[in-house]
Amino acid sequence: MAGGPSTPELVAAVCGSGGLGFLAAGYKSAADMRAEIDRTRALTGEPFGVNVFMPTADTPEPGELDRYRRDLAGEARRLGVALGTPHGGDDGFDAKIEDLLAAPPPVVSFTFGCPDDSLIRAFQRRGTAVLVTVTTVEEARSAAAADGLCVQGAEAGGHRGSFTNDELEGVGLHRLLSDLRPRTRQPLIAAGGIASPVDLGDVLALGAVAGMAGTAFLRCPESGTSAVHRAALTDPRLTRTAMTRAFTGRPARGLVNRFLTEHSAQAPAAYPHVHHLTAPLRKEAAARGDVDTVHLWAGQSWRHIRQAPAADIVADLTRL
Ligand SMILES: Cc1cc2nc3c(=O)[nH]c(=O)nc-3n(C[C@H](O)[C@H](O)[C@H](O)COP(=O)(O)O)c2cc1C
């Protein structure tokens, strides 16, 4: 979980209680990623994973971004900040890959796309298992060289890991598993809305070898979830989640707040351009504890999560 929640402490706690924790390489430099890997290695001897964003290929028309900038001008005035400069970028992909190949972690997972077979094989030769997040049968087909697939349903919190940016809503997890199970022999790891042993049992019954949870860990003391995000997860005024491009330009599921309600319809499909455009707004809003203006990633099962150490959450989920 990039953006703060995944910390070495959270990963070590999950790995120490029978789970497989993932560090987030997204939104940080290769050097910061390496520092987190080293800290995780110091905290646990168990295997863990590192999650990397694949470079994305959105090429928005300048007019689209200008229109969205005008739409957000009132937000910037209200908070007294300048909007960011929208630009593309690959999140430092090459530097991160170079570093990971030089000192390979046990597992690497990719989202927003699939690396080419030669890169997958380079990790495999070094003993690193490669997982790729997929959200459709077609994406799964193009990730045939991976050691396993993270099958992410539309229930999931945070960004959808789709390879393209053309569809907002996505397919539910059970539908996807049912469609995928007969079509591949790769291990399927199910993600999206898993918050109880029943949820986990359901996906195992549909042929997954494991379940993957994000939202369930957002309230753990070991997680780096921001104060405003934590408060939002128990705020009675926030009553549902929705998919939106309003904050980053890519479909992501979050709690429905004022910003999401007012800007989703105008937001262009332009990632990471919109992410950079709104970053100063979100930073300032988070500092002020302004729950109406920040992104509040959460999956559809957010009501069922509790504040407890990560080891207890793993025990909750696996009590079959
Ligand atoms: C706050 C947050 C941040 C996330 N960041 C990432 C990320 O950096 N990379 C990634 O592959 N998935 C990310 N995800 C999605 C998770 O990998 C996973 O698919 C999702 O959490 C599963 O659904 P759930 O939230 O209902 O448990 C994130 C999810 C959340 C809630």
Image: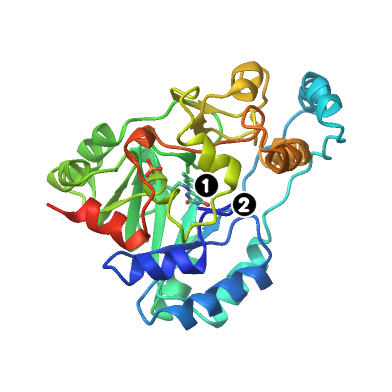
Question: Do the residues bearing badges 2 and 1 touch, measured as CB atoms within 8 Å?
Answer: yes
Say what amino acid the circle numbered 1 marks: Phe
Q: Is residue 123 left or right of residue 261?
A: left
**Residue 78: which disc?**
none
Say what amino acid the circle numbered 2 marks: Pro
Q: Nearer the viewer, residue 312 or 68?
A: 312
Mark 2 CB within 8 Å of ligand 1: no
Residue 97, picture quadrant: bottom right
Q: Is residue 197 left or right of residue 78?
A: left
Q: Nearer the viewer, residue 135 or 5?
A: 5
State whether residue 63 appears in this view.
Answer: no
**So how many labels did they put on this image?**
2
Q: Residue 292 location in percent, x, y?
A: 63, 27
Rendered residue at 34%/69% (across/down)? 15
Q: Is residue 309 above or below residue 271?
A: below
Q: Is residue 253 left or right of residue 282?
A: left
Rendered residue at 51%/32% (across/down)? 254
Mark 1 CB within 8 Å of ligand 1: yes
Q: How is the image coloured?
A: rainbow
Q: Is residue 128 left or right of residue 289?
A: left
Mark 1 — residue? 112
Secondary-structure class at tag 1: loop
Mark 2 — residue? 55
